[in-house]
Structures are given as C-alpha cells and as structure tokens.
Amino acid sequence: MSQVGEILDSMDYGPAPEAANFANEWLDKHGRKFGHYLGGKWVPAESHFASICPSTGKELAQIGQGSSAQVDEAVKAAREGLKAWTKLGPAGRSRVLYALARQIQKHSRLFAVLESLDNGKPIRETRDIDIPLVARHFYYHAGWARLIETEFPEYENVGVCGQIIPWNFPLLMLSWKIAPALAAGNAVILKPAEFTSLSALLFAEICHQVGVPAGVVNIITGDGETGKAMVAHEGIDKIAFTGSTEVGRILRRVTAGTGKKLSLELGGKSPFIVFEDADVDSAIEGIVDAIWFNQGQVCCAGSRLLVQESIADRFYKKLRRRMESLRVGDPLDKAVDIGAIVDATQLARITELVGTGVKEGAKCFQPKCKFPEGGWFYPPTLLTDVEPSSTVAQVEIFGPVLVAMTFRTPAEAVALANNTVYGLASSVWTQNLDVAHDIAAQIKAGTVWVNCTNQFDANAGFGGYRESGFGRESGREGMFEYLRWRAPYLPAGNLAEIKESPSNGALDRTHKLFIGGKQARPDGGYSISLPVASGGVVEVSRGNRKDIRNAVEAAATAAPAWGAQTGYLRSQILYFLAENMEANRAALETALTDRGGSGDEVTKAIDAALLFAGWADKHEGTVHPVPLRAVTYTRPEVLGVVGVVCEDAQPLLGFVSSVAANLAMGNAVVVIPSRHNPLAAMEMMRVIEASDIPSGVLNIVTGQIDELVPDLAGHAGVDALWCFADAEICEQVEQMSVSNLKQTWCLHGHSLDWTKAPSGEILRRATQLKNIWVPYGA
Ligand code: NAI
C-alpha cells in the first residue's frame, strides 16, 4: 500500500523496457563480428573496430574496417551487379524494392531495437518514426522503379553510386540513399558511419533474403578512411554524402574535375520562429520535436529559437517547465524522451560548445536529470541572452541544445533566420496564414515547416540552400540525383582560326565591360587584341579580380528586387530583349562571322530569348500527396547570383540561352563570354542597354578566362555557377566552388546543342526547390 501511495505522491514513471533479446540473438548469431557484404557474399574484414552501445558504454560487436582493396572489390561487384539489375527492367526492379519494403516492415521490431542499441536513440523514435519512414521510402521508390522510363525519358541511370552516411539516422539515411538509387537503375556501395553500422548489416542480410541480385547492393563498413577510398575510386560514378560540412567540402575538392556526380546533404542551424499570435502550447511541443528529437543530433534540428519579444518571457517560462518533464534515460525504455549521445567525442563537443556559449554571455538552463550509469548522456539545454553573432548561434552543436533569441518585427525575424551560412530547414509558428506564407517565402532554406517541424516523407523533397549542400533527397526531385541527363551535345569541332590581317580602316574600337547597367573600363586598363575576319583586330577589355568583384556586387545588389519581380514582368523584359536583338541582327551577325562563326546563330539566339521569355511565368511547383493532413508544396525559387562561363562553339546562342534561362527564373547574372569569340556578347551589351533589364541584373566581364574563372568560382557572393568552357576550366570551377559550396553545372568540355536541349534540365539548374509544409485541420 505504501508503495502505491508513494507512486501516487511522486507520479513517477515505472520502467517500461523494450526487450533486446531478438537483437542480442541476432548479434550472437553473427558471433558479434562482421565482415562486409560485397557481391552478394559476406567477405571477411582485414581488421576490426568496436561498435559501442552509447547508453551503456559496452561493446556490441566488432565491425570491419574496409580497406582500399575491399573498396575496389566492392566496385567490381557493383559493376557486375549493375548488369543484372539493368537486365531485370523496371517491373523486376520494382518488385525487388517492394519486397525490401515488406521485409523491413516484417523485421521492424528487430531493426528498431538494434538501432536504439547502436545509436542511443529512444525506442519510441526508432519504432514510430525511423523504421516506418524507411519502409515508406522503399514502397514509394518501388513506384519510381516502375515509372522510371516513362517519367524520366530524357535521363539514364548514373551507374555505380558510392553512398556515405552519418550516424544520426543510420537506417533512415540508408533508405534515403539506397531506395532512389536502385529505383533509378543503379548499383550501390554504401558505407554506414563507423559508430552505427549494425542496421546496415542487417539490411544487407534482408537484401540477400529477398534475392536482390548479387552486387546490386554492397555494404562496406569502416571509418573516414574507407570513405576516402570510395570517393577517390575511379570506378564510382556518383558520390552521395550526408554528414558534416567540413567533410562535404573535402568531397567537393576531391571529386572536382572527375565528372563524378555529387550530392551533399550537410549541416544546419535551422531557425524555429514563434510569432506572438502562435498557438503557444503547440509551439512548445514543436520545440520538443525540433531540438530534443534524437538528442538534437539532427541536421535539420530547430536549434535556433527566435521568439517575438512581446511573448518571450512567458514563452521561456513555459518552455523551462516543459523541459523539466522531459525524461532522459535508457533508450530502450518506451517512456523515455531523450536517449544517449552517440559517442564520447560528440558528448565532449556538445559540452565544450555550451561552455563557450556561457563564456560568451549566454544564460544556461538545464533541468535536473538522473542519467543511467556508464553511458553518454546530456540534459536538454536552453541558452538565452544569446547574441546573433555568438559561437552557439552560428555553429552546429548537434546536441540537445536550444539557443534562443528574440525579435520585434517580421522583417527582423527573417533577418535573424537568414543570418547563417546554412539553409537546410526552418519552422514558422503563427496562426496568421498571411504571415506564414510571407515568411516561408523569405527564408533561405530548403524546407519550411509551418506550425509543425521535422516532418518527412518519401514524396517531399529535402535538401539544403547555401552551405547546407546541394541536391535533394526524396520525391521526384530526389530522383534526379541518381539520373544523368542525356544531354544533346554538339559533335566536337575545331574552332576557326582567324589570322591577323591588315585593318579595314574602321575606327579603332575597344569593347568595355558591362557592370551595374553601364559600360565600364577594366580596372587594370589592359585589353586583349582579337584578329577579326573583316580585317585588323578588335580590342576586348581584360578584366581582373576587382572587375569580377564589382560585377558580383552589382549582381548581388540587384538580385533581391529582380528575384521578387513577377514572372510576367520578367517575360515581357525578355521578349523585348529578343525584339532588340532582331533590330541589331546585322551587328550580331558580324560579331559572329568576324571570328569565323556563322551568322545563322543569331536567329537561334533570338529563338532562345523567346523560349525562356515563354518559360518565365510557367516553371511551377507541385503539391505533394503526403500521408498527413497538410498542403505540402514545392516552390522553385531563385538561386540569387549565378555565374556563367560561356562556351566557344556557339558564343551567342550559349550566351543568350544561359542568360535568358537565369533571368527568366529571377537570377542576376555575371557572365564571362566565350574565350574564342567574346564579340557577340560585346554586341549584346548594346542590345541590353536598349532593353529594360534593370541595372546590375546582367553583368559581363571579358578577359583571360583562366584568370577570371577562379575569382568568379571562389566568390562567396555567387550562389551557383554554370561552366560550359573546357574541361580544365570546369575542374577549376569545381575546386574553387568549395568557398561557399555553391552548386555548379559543368559540362566538362562538351558543348550543348541548345536548339535540341529540352528546357526541363536547364530550368532545374536555374532554380532551387523549397518544400513548404502547411498542416490543416479545423
Ligand atoms: P562526418 O562528416 O565526419 O561523418 C559522416 C560520414 O562521412 C561517416 O560515414 C564518416 O565515416 C565519413 N567520412 C568522414 N571523413 C571522410 C572523408 N574524408 N571522406 C569520405 N568519408 C568520410 O561526421 P562526424 O564526424 O560523424 O560528426 C561530426 C559533426 O558533423 C557532428 O558534430 C555534426 O555537427 C556534423 N554532422 C552532421 C550530420 C548531418 O546530417 N548534417 C550528420 C553527422 C554529423
């Protein structure tokens, strides 16, 4: 009786442990020692390391450390697997993905427990969120496997995909990588994170059971060294990576110039914005899901709370009270909210960063928590009085730590929200739909959750803006990451060589640069002489680093207003551009023929301006049917400032097509014209002056292309870069793009046949997708 009395007094939870016996039996069955799954067989590892249970500190199993030789073996296996997978065809591949989905559901309990043991996350989350989402991913992509040929007719599979994933959602990240890759007809080599390899190994076993053809799915375990060997391997056609921005940068550098396709899903510092008219209790529960879900080890965790000043004190008070009721403890306890931190190093990093925050002036609140012994735990933490520029407001902590700041006006909320190098996700809380949509449009992030947070579905794209990486996962948009565009290329041809000849007596003429709506002299005052067929030479300005900087500044200043214009207005401006080109036809033709080109290109270029004028108000998003009462829609958004390095084969058509596509989508542009014939672009300068393109929206810098390109590619004010120059220049572009991880589109020396290129891929490259979730319910 006294016991019942005590329970009623304390109202404490009793233990509710999930049994771990199935998972332990599975580990025992393998002797708690694993090799790699390559070519449909288990291959013994050359060396091992321990996988530790974060909640107890005890060893769970010995995991293989994949060597370079084994990566090579995996690539060979995958090449073989690819043949079998291709032979199976869309319907056969779809059946296999469906079988995987079914088996994941059937083994869901084992997966959930194993994942909790290995990662430290609460069983409530693995059971109710991770594993159901994994199954959903395979079901969903079983559909794309079937539809691939009819829905993506202009694309083909990439080949062998190397996939490197982190430890925070081991099986979920595996499914985000493997399901679309297989659906698109590729073979994969996946490397799980060294802390959490077990569920991937169990998945390999499931692949074996359902008869995935040998070599189609290969799982190699190991740490960053194994990852490095994968990234460097010539036989891998694509690298898909989720993890830290630091490693993401390394991968961009290593893959530069190799032609390997790359997608990066990196860190975040996502804002969670609460307006004074928000449903406060819902917002508080939202925060619990935003930052204490998975111990805050979530790339899109709502780690920066921005709360309207008028309600801040009341809100913090409620939040602290809610934090006191959060239960930290054994991840296998079904009534635990916060489990263990994945590893001692991660725990040390969180502890250190919170210490730095306090040293920099933040007030720290942590409820009293009793932790189980032996594991790595950290209490839910709230840091208030944080300056927007302080370390904890800028750096990804990747732990259960919420950093709070206040704002007064919607404009201030947006400024604070965007005050980060990242752009993965965000949450907006308000009962006012006008405010919600207005703010959602202004936040620079790949996902905006309105009055909800951390919602995911296989049918809604996910991925970052800015230094959160590029590429998307899930949905139709995610499929493009595993497909290669069958680009219509022109046959390689030699460029006409124009020999210097005597001047035809025309007045000496030096073309200037075009920056901020005006013709500008180059900073260095130098020029380049180009012999022309009509006689003599034409001087073209030799721009330098300062000219590039001025052009990017002009573009960045003009970009917000241009991006906010309606598609209708942009289309009218492009139609007028086409009209002015027609009026200047003769001069454009001369500019082409003077450097050995054909005047026919003018008509094609005018057609290209008309084409993208037509697209300006038609490239639209979609509404996704997700399994939630929500309108979840995609907005193709402007990239901002786009750099374009033009090709030589079609100096006018290439210039006009890439510029018009970008202008149509609302980007401001800095162009480096064709190395061989910049004259056509110079002539366009005069056409542009006579049209209504606002100052700074289109800037042209001529000069030595290999001097200019590194400056443009490395400039942090450039958001994306299209490079149609030769392969060496493309490599430079990819190398230098690590500065701000801008997305690049390089054709590695091929010349696009713009007249045959369908617009879809071009417009996809000129925009970035934002997914906005707006749940509803009366
Ligand atoms: P990480 O980026 O080092 O590891 C992610 C994956 O990359 C692992 O599979 C790892 O073995 C592999 N890897 C490491 N170095 C590599 C290299 N040079 N080449 C190829 N593969 C390599 O992340 P880590 O060390 O586990 O965590 C460090 C920090 O990264 C965390 O504190 C957190 O801030 C952030 N992080 C972000 C994640 C996200 O989803 N955005 C996920 C995991 C970590």
Image (cartoon, rainbow, N blue to C red):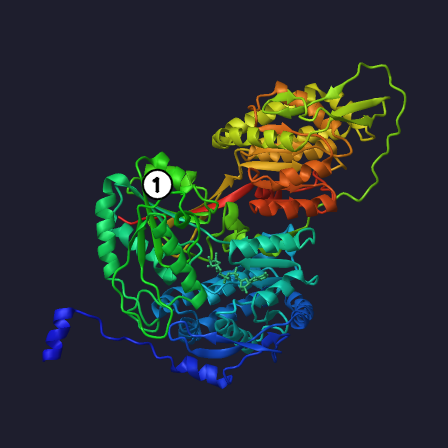
Q: Amino acid at mark 1?
A: Ala
User: Which residue appears at 67% of the width and 71% of the height?
Assistant: 77
How many labels sit on residues?
A: 1
In the image, is 630 to the left or to the right of 678?
Answer: left
**How many other residues sit within 10 Å of disc 1, few (<14), some (14-19) or many (≥20)?**
many
| Label 1 residue near ligand 1, CB within 8 Å | no
Q: Residue 67 location, x and y as percent?
A: 64, 72
Q: Is residue 130 above or below residue 558?
A: below
Q: Is residue 510 visible?
A: yes
User: Which residue appears at 43% of the width and 41% of the height?
Assistant: 418
Task: Report the front residue among 259 and 5.
Answer: 5
User: Which residue appears at 34% of the width and 73% of the height?
Assistant: 332
Indicate the quadrant containing the N terminus: top left, top right, bottom left or bottom right: bottom left
Q: Is residue 454 visible?
A: no
Q: Residue 12 location, x and y as percent?
A: 19, 70
Q: Residue 709 location, x and y as percent?
A: 68, 39
Q: Residue furthest front?
A: 359
Q: Is residue 413 above or below residue 84?
A: above
Q: Residue 391 location, x and y as percent?
A: 41, 49
Residue beneath disc 1: 436
Q: Secondary structure at mark 1?
A: helix
Task: Report the front residue among 188 and 571.
Answer: 188
In the image, is 46 to the left or to the right of 399?
Answer: right
State which quadrant residue 373 falls in: bottom left
